[in-house]
Every structure is written in structure tokens, then in C-alpha cells.
Image (cartoon, rainbow, N blue to C red):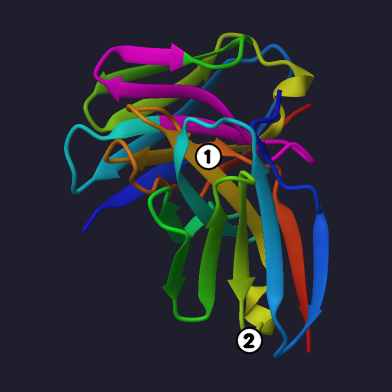
Amino acid sequence: DQQVKQNSPSLSVQEGRISILNCDYTNSMFDYFLWYKKYPAEGPTFLISISSIKDKNEDGRFTVFLNKSAKHLSLHIVPSQPGDSAVYFCAASGSGNTPLVFGKGTRLSVIA
Amino acid sequence: SQTIHQWPATLVQPVGSPLSLECTVEGTSNPNLYWYRQAAGRGLQLLFYSVGIGQISSEVPQNLSASRPQDRQFILSSKKLLLSDSGFYLCAWDRGQNTEAFFGQGTRLTVV
């Protein structure tokens, strides 16, 4: 049973345009959500997070939106740059000291 | 500042051989520690996590085991490797509830 779903395995965007990566979750107990970026043969690096008490969090070119009623979150990257090309993982955790649950990832390709 | 070390970076092992992957964290105390595996098309799968010395929770039944002999040391082991154990293994740590996890650089394990 997949609790965190990233239904788009890949996304291709032109440089300078907006990249929108989507993530859905099924567990209503999740209250903390994160996005990670991963290059090949490297560990994932933390990008941005959002608590369930918020619906938006912004950090430079990256903005995460949370829609709790729809159990959906998205990551917006604007403007997209070629260096943003990587696999992006959505993750979530619930109350208590519980591990992060990851989606399968979306491969973003930013074309110059 | 905190750092996480994971080694080796790559490993080729024959079927039936033992395995020992080590991970250490510096600059923090009493971290939560995790072992994840990334297999093709399957995202980041949580294998084990630990909230303290000697405390190990297993998420997926398999022929792997984990140990935490010291506060900042996490070891992934196997007595006899299977071909299906091939993958990219990642160690991670965090400070607890609603905090981001930080990943090591990963170990590419190929069982031949």
C-alpha cells in the first residue's frame, strides 16, 4: 500500500519556465511534508518542507503548496534551470517519532 | 555542523557472501538513524530505523539486519547475499519528529 504517490515518473520543462511536481498521500495522520532532490549515484538532498498547519512555504525559486482536503502537495520551481534536472522525491511523516515515507520520485529534465 | 559518512561507495559481492555497510554521524547526539534502499522504479524503501542504541525497527522482512552499537553508528549486514539485494543503499539521520532527514552519499551494491 503506497501512502505517498508521485504519479508522474518524468517531467520535461523548458529552461525559464515553471516546473510543477505533484504528490498525493493517503494517510490523514501525515502532518509534515518534504521535498528532496537527488542526482544519480548521490544521496538525496533536502529542498523544502511544509507543516500541515500551513498551505504554502516559499524558499527562493522553490515553493511548496499543501492542500490538506485533497491530500495533495506540489512543488513549484520557477524559473527552472538546467541544474534543476534531477529526480525529486516527495516525503511525509506523521505524529510521533516515525520515519519519513517517500514516493517513487519524478525525474525532471530542464531543457535549455 | 553535522555530517554523515557512509562507506564504501561501491561494492561488488558474490552471491552467498556476507555484507557489512557502515554509517556514522558526526556533530550531533542521539540521532534517529535509517537505512533505505533505492531499487529501480521503486523509490526509496525504508529498511531499518533506530531511535537509540540497540533499538532497531525492521520495516521489510528480508535477509538483511541492522545494528546500532554506538549512538552515532549504524551498520547494515547480511550473512548471505542474494542477487535481489543489489541496489543503492542510503543511510540517513534526523533529529526526530517533523525534522528533515539528511542522507549519506550512498553505497552501490552489486551482487553477482
Image side of residue B40 versus residue B109, left or right: right
Q: Quadrant of the N terminus of chain B?
A: bottom left
Crowding near the residue tagged with mark 1, few <14, some 14–19, many ≥20 C-alpha atoms within 10 Å: many
Give the Cα distance between marks 2 and 1. 30 Å
Q: Which residue is mark 2?
A: A79
Identify the residue at horizontal 45%, vertical 47% (top origin). Answer: B104
Position of A60 relative to B73 (above/below):
below
The magenta-colored residue range is B34-57
Q: Amino acid at mark 1?
A: Leu
Judge left or right: residue A9 versus residue B74: right
Is residue A111 something one can see in this rendering? yes
Q: Look at mark 1 in the image and give the residue it sits on.
A: B90
Residue B24 counted in the magenta span: no
Find out whether residue B39 is within the magenta segment. Answer: yes
Q: Nearer the viewer, mark 2 or mark 1?
A: 2
- Which of the pair A29/A103 is nearer the observer? A29
Task: Give the quarter of the image for residue A99.
Answer: top left
Residue B5 location (% of width, % of height) = 37, 46
Circles 2 and 1 on the same chain:
no
Q: Main secondary structure of the magenta part?
A: strand
Quadrant of the rendered image containing residue A5: top right
Q: Is residue B58 above or below residue A97?
A: above
Instruction: Name the one closer to the observer, A83 or B23.
Output: A83
Q: Hey, which quadrant is residue B93 in on the image? A: top left
Q: Is residue B8 visible?
A: no
Between residues A84 and B112, which one lies in front from this camera angle? Answer: A84
Q: Residue at x 47, y 59 (%)?
A: A55
| Label 2: chain letter | A
